[in-house]
Image (cartoon, grey):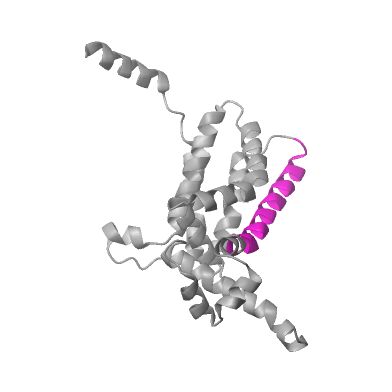
């Protein structure tokens, strides 16, 4: 391959990734065809096959190019607050900020594709496919182990099962919020305040409130259920 052609390879690869990212976010993985991607990127199918080999490999690379850096930033933020704590348990709010704050900062980036990617990631959580779910589980393994471990140490009196559920709820809230305001408009009408930069303080306040909420009173709930069964 000639030198001029080699110089265009990174640009072509980035155009394909950018096009795929937008189309996957707008239409989902199944509904997005390779023809749609090549048309939006202004390339032929041979270029996609050359750079990625298959649609599955393209999907993985769309996630990997931003998720790898996002997870690196999360771990760096956790490393920093752990170093500052000097071995003491971390404040739960600092852990939440380190994990979700980096995500929301990326979601506020409307100039370099961060907002589009986080909307795609949010859509992936709400419309998961087996292939993508398995890939994301592998990408998140180290990060989730570190952050959940930090939460367990910071909340020793909270059952681990409850921490897992609350983290699950926080991930869902973030994904739903980042996915856009379309659902909100269904019951709120026209919604002008959709600035991604405002999302961080709003959502962080909500997430921290959920993490600090009182634990459910399962004993009373179980007693009511037993009473209902006995009455029946």
Q: Residue at x 55, y 58 (%)?
A: 104
Between 100 and 57, the one nearer to me in the picture: 57
Reply above or below: 44 against 52: below
Q: Quadrant of the C terminus?
A: top left
Quarter of image, res 228: top left
Q: Residue at x 56, y 66 (%)?
A: 114
Between 131 and 72, the one nearer to me in the picture: 131
Quarter of image, res 189: bottom left
Quarter of image, res 67: bottom right
- Locate residue 103 relative to residue 228 in the image: left or right: right
Q: Which residues are magenta?
A: 62-87
Residue 5's x, y, as percent? 71, 85
Reply above or below: 216 against 85: above
Residue 203's x, y, as percent? 48, 52
Say if residue 210 shows up in the picture. yes
- Locate residue 224 relative to residue 154 in the image: left or right: left
**Does the magenta portion include 84?**
yes
Residue 16's x, y, as percent? 58, 74
Residue 154's x, y, as percent? 63, 34
Q: Quadrant of the N terminus?
A: bottom right
Between 219 and 133, the one nearer to me in the picture: 133
How many discs appear?
0
Residue found farthest to the top: 230
- Is most of the magenta stretch helix, strand or loop? helix
């Amino acid at each position: 391959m000639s030198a001029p052609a080699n110089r265009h390879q990174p640009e072509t690869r980035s155009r394909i990734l950018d096009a795929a990212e937008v189309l996957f976010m707008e239409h989902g993985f199944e509904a997005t065809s390779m023809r749609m991607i090549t048309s939006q990127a202004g390339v032929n199918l041979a270029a996609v096959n050359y750079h990625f080999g298959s649609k599955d490999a393209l999907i993985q690379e769309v996630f990997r190019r931003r998720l790898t850096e996002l997870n690196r930033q999360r771990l760096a933020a956790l490393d920093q607050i752990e170093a500052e704590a000097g071995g003491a348990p971390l404040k739960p709010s600092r852990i939440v900020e380190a994990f979700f704050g980096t995500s929301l900062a990326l979601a506020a980036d409307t100039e370099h594709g961060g907002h589009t990617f986080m909307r795609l990631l949010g859509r992936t959580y709400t419309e998961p496919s087996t292939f993508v779910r398995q890939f994301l589980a592998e990408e998140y393994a180290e990060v989730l182990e570190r952050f959940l471990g930090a939460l367990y140490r910071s909340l020793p009196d909270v059952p681990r099962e409850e921490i897992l559920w609350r983290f699950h709820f926080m991930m869902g809230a973030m994904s739903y919020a980042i996915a856009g305001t379309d659902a909100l408009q269904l019951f709120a009408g026209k919604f002008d305040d959709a600035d991604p930069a405002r999302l961080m303080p709003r959502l962080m306040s909500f997430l921290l409130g959920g993490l600090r909420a009182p634990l459910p009173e399962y004993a009373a709930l179980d007693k009511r259920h037993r009473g209902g069964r006995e009455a029946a």
